[in-house]
Amino acid sequence: MVFSSLIFLFCFFPIFLICYFVPQKRKTRNIVLLIFSLMFYGYGEPIYVILMILSILVNYYIALVMDKSSSKKKWLIIDLVFNLGLLFIFKYTNFFLDNINNLFNLNIKFLSISLPIGISFYTFQILTYVIDVYKGKVDVQKSIINLGCYISAFPQLIAGPIVRYETVNEELDERCENIENFATGIRRFIIGLFKKVVIANEMAYVADTLFGSSIAELGIIGMVVGGVAFTFQIYFDFSGYSDMAIGLGKMLGFNYLENFNYPYIARSITSFWRRWHISLSTFFRDYVYIPLGGNRCKGARHIFNLFVVWALTGLWHGASWNFVFWGLFYFVLLVLEKFVFKNIDKLPKVLGHIYTFSLVTFGFIIFYFTDTSVLVEAIKTLFGAHGFGNLSVFSHYQIIRVRTILVFILAIFACTPIFKNMLDKKNKMSDIIILVLFILSIVSILASSYNPFIYFRF
């Protein structure tokens, strides 16, 4: 189930709200949230609800034992092995076997398992809780209901943002649910819904149509248009989902941290990663980069720390070499900006924006193609191996249409704070605009069955 579906909007969520707000006791509301969250998760993959419950029970027990144990590190290692082991089994086993087969010319059979939705997100959330208990940053959670709500809460379960336990631990017991927060949450949810179903879905149509065709036919212009479309798609898809998650959390009294801060207005790659998927980048910073020594180390060790972080960042996104290449692409760029082009932020604004957006778009082309041979062909095409291309490609694939052009323009506009300012409560027209966005979103859902969601696979 996704937030941008009619069954969620007009069935699941209204029923949940009634069941949630009727009882007054916090414990009862948390039980309702836990039950509906498991139902939400089980709607698409009933069997993996068992995995979710197992994760809750095991981590609850380990954290309790670790808190009282004199051998805290032993229990932390056990917990890391359990959680990362599950992630490896379900997400990386077949990738590992495939590489072993290719390397040693073997024929080991793959496991017949599917990737549990959102496993990367909720695994990292669990780890923030257990590691912070180990460090003494937070108190151990003695209520299994509360811990279950934290791990499985449906607003952020499928695609984040990665919510740290320290962000919501107090709100699990005491949070403010009122009309003002609920109204703010609704506004934020509608903005995210619009970004997802109107902008991201149209951009997905363009990217998937072009990149799903013969790559050689596209030429430079086809690759550029497809790359820009996918760059817009992944931003509005993921930031839209984050907006909806933050809005839903707000309705229930949770204050989730922002996950995006207009990354496409960045003027350097360093700035881009301070603005993009903030919850993931800060996770790797605080739980991997800093423990390795961060930037406190000299030269080669500092570079090694960056290498580890960006290799893991790429691999986190998927069990495929293109994701590793994508992570290492950013590793190289960030090393260059940190040690060679130290004054990159002093470029004229226009040049800084062009530099950053061009490299980000190239990165997302790497991100898109999971087949390495097709990726190589795509890069060759982008750099002119099959000519400049012509507009007949777009007419052939029905890309040139009024709706698509308007959404492209809207996407450029919505990447900037101007869009946010229009929807600010201080703007007298903002309520009307929000209503129009909601109507357009529902019309878009009704009119199209094409509703992909990229981060399902992560």
Image: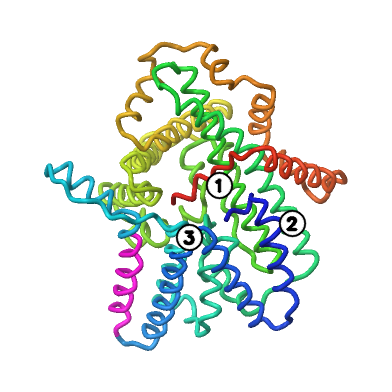
Q: Position of residue 246 (x, y in %)?
A: 64, 58
From this view, report whether residue 444 is shown above or below residue 133.
above
Q: Quadrant of residue 9?
A: bottom right
Taking depth in this image into account, of 451 and 162 the one nearest to the observer is 451
Q: Amino acid at mark 2?
A: Ile
Q: Which residues are magenta?
A: 71-87
Q: Which mark identifies residue 186?
A: 2
Please report contact status of discs 3 and 1: CB closer than 8 Å, yes or no: no
The kind of secondary structure element at disc 3 is loop
Q: CA distance from mark 1 to mark 2?
A: 18 Å
Left or right of 73? Residue 1 is: right
From this view, report whether residue 82 is shown above or below residue 407.
below
Q: CA distance from mark 3 to mark 1?
A: 21 Å
Q: Which mark identifies residue 380?
A: none
The mark closer to the camera, 3 or 1, is 3
At x 46%, y 42%, the residue is 270
**Which callout, 2 or 3, points at the residue further toward the start of the chain?**
3
At x 32%, y 70%, the residue is 82
Q: Position of residue 273 (x, y in %)?
A: 48, 45
The kind of secondary structure element at disc 1 is helix
